[in-house]
Amino acid sequence: MNIQEYFGRISYNKPYKDADLQTLRAIFQHHIQTIPFENLSMHCGEPVELDLQATYNKIVRKKRGGWCLEINHLLFWALQELGYEVCILGANSYEPAEKGYTAEINHILLKVVIQGDSYIVDAGFGGAYQMWQPLMLISGKDQPQVPGIFHLMEDDGTWYLEKVKRKHYIPEPRNNDIPDTPDLGNIRKIYRFTLEPRHIDDFQELNEYLQVSPDNILRKKSICTLQTSNGLLALVGWSLTEMKYNYKEDMDLVNITTLTDEEVEKTLKDKFNIVLENKLVP
């Protein structure tokens, strides 16, 4: 495991000097635009190991992506190697269909402290709710980014991450719009978390559960999403969504295409730079 090899994987070739905010932002941006959020392993019959060496080999050497447990674990290692003060946190994601947060922790994110200021760094949420920059750990402050306005709210030691939703402009509307249950208003709740430090081993049970539980979205759908320079690519099953943020004022352009099995494989290679070793069953 070599930090220069990781830099090559994320196409980061600037000189590295200090563990400062500017460098963190740059590395984070490269990370989310080159490493897809994807759960293709479980739809290819490959086990997902929650082991840093296995994650490194998969994402860095085989040029794959992963889900939050893998992507954020790799980023945690990289930031530690670069001298950042970083720790793992656990979150309960919001389920729009259930109108509530999951009972169990089912997501990991990172907290990075730079010169006494704390930031939330999460490269593993994917889709349209993926942050593009570290968020200052401050309650009640709007933090505008290209994907939209994020804000954190703190209540009695529990933190809540939300995003202001934008409207979608769909040139050719179809029934299979982006899978997301609309909730009231234009605020999309994302997850809640506390600042209790966690260890990756705390998530071994979750990693195994997600691979076998028929109820969770990761088992129901094959997902591969990647942030681009101006938006988002998302392949869910046979449906490819290409989103351009802020195409018009407060509106995102959304194009949806239904692919054949052959086109799925080609799209993974051409748009996500992923070549699978085993056959994908979308």
Image: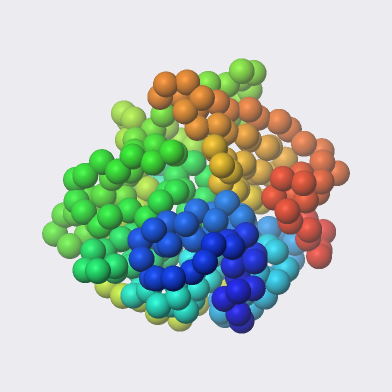
Q: Which residue is farthest right?
A: 262
Give x and y (percent) for residue 200: 45, 77
- Foreground: 107 or 147? 147
The answer to whether residue 192 is seen in the rendering is yes
Task: Count how many numbered circles sit on residues in the image.
Answer: 0
* Colour setup of the view: rainbow
> Residue 197 at x, y = what percent?
31, 75
Residue 149, picture quadrant: top left
Q: Say above or below: 178 vs 111.
A: above
Residue 69 visible in the current orientation: no
Direction left: furthest residue: 156
Quadrant in the picture for residue 163: top left
> Relative to 231, does residue 194 appear above or below in the rendering?
below
Q: Nearer the viewer, residue 7 or 149?
A: 7
In the image, 6 versus 166, the foreground residue is 6
The residue sitting at 68% across, 62% down in the picture is 64
On the image, the x and y values in percent for residue 86 come to 36, 73
Q: Is residue 170 above or below residue 268?
A: above
Looking at the image, residue 106 sits to the left or right of residue 150; the answer is: right
In the rendering, at what x and y percent does residue 120 appear? 34, 59
- Which residue is at a point 47% across and 28% down the rendered structure image? 246
**Viewer-nearest residue: 11 or 154:** 11
Q: Residue at x 39, y 58 (%)?
A: 22
Q: Quadrant of the N terminus?
A: bottom right
Residue sitting at x 77%, y 46%: 270
